[in-house]
Amino acid sequence: MNVNILWDFDGTLVDSYCVFIRMFKRVVEENIHEDEIMNHLKILFTHVVKYYGL
């Protein structure tokens, strides 16, 4: 008997966007508005990394 479980923790039980936004603001060390980072995060996490050259 096969049992498959799909678990979506992030975004369902916990919203980690605010943590990632604070992290990127600290690492980039520029005056970046949180909405700008959020727009990039909505595309893909790695998109933010590439966009800011991290």
Image (spheres, rainbow, N blue to C red):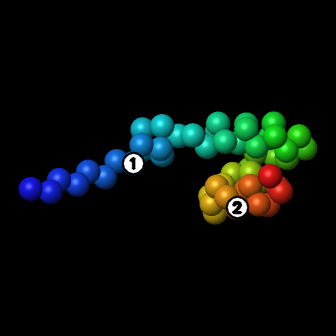
Res 53 → quadrant:
bottom right
Q: Nearer the viewer, residue 5 or 16?
A: 5
In the image, what residue occupies the spot 73% across and 37% down? 22
**Crowding near the residue tagged with mark 1, few <14, some 14–19, many ≥20 C-alpha atoms within 10 Å:** few
Residue displayed at 39% across by 48% down: 8
- CB under 8 Å between callouts 2 and 1? no
Structural distance between the alpha carbons of marks 2 and 1: 21 Å
Q: Residue furthest right?
A: 30
Going by the numbered disc 1, the residue's amino acid type is Asp
**2 and 44: which is toward the camera:** 2
> Does residue 7 appear left or right of residue 49 in this picture?
left
Q: Is residue 46 above or below residue 33?
A: below
Looking at the picture, how far across and down is residue 32, in whole percent? Answer: 85, 46
Which quadrant holds the N terminus? Answer: bottom left
Residue 44 in view of the camera? yes
Q: Residue furthest left?
A: 1
Along the horizontal axis of the image, is 53 left or right of 15? Answer: right
Residue drawn 64% across the image and 55% down it: 45
- Earlier residue among tags 2 and 1: 1
Q: Position of residue 52 (x, y in %)?
A: 82, 55
- Residue underneath mark 2: 47
Tell me the SS state at disc 2: helix
Could you tell me the amino acid type at mark 2?
His
How would you rate the neighbour count of disc 2 (Cα within 10 Å): few for under 14, some for 14-19, many for 20 or more?
few
Query: Would you name the residue on which mark 1 appears?
Result: 8
Q: Secondary structure at mark 1?
A: loop
Is residue 40 visible in the rendered image? The answer is no
Horizontal arrangement in the rendering, residue 22 relative to residue 1 (left or right)? right
Tally of numbered discs: 2
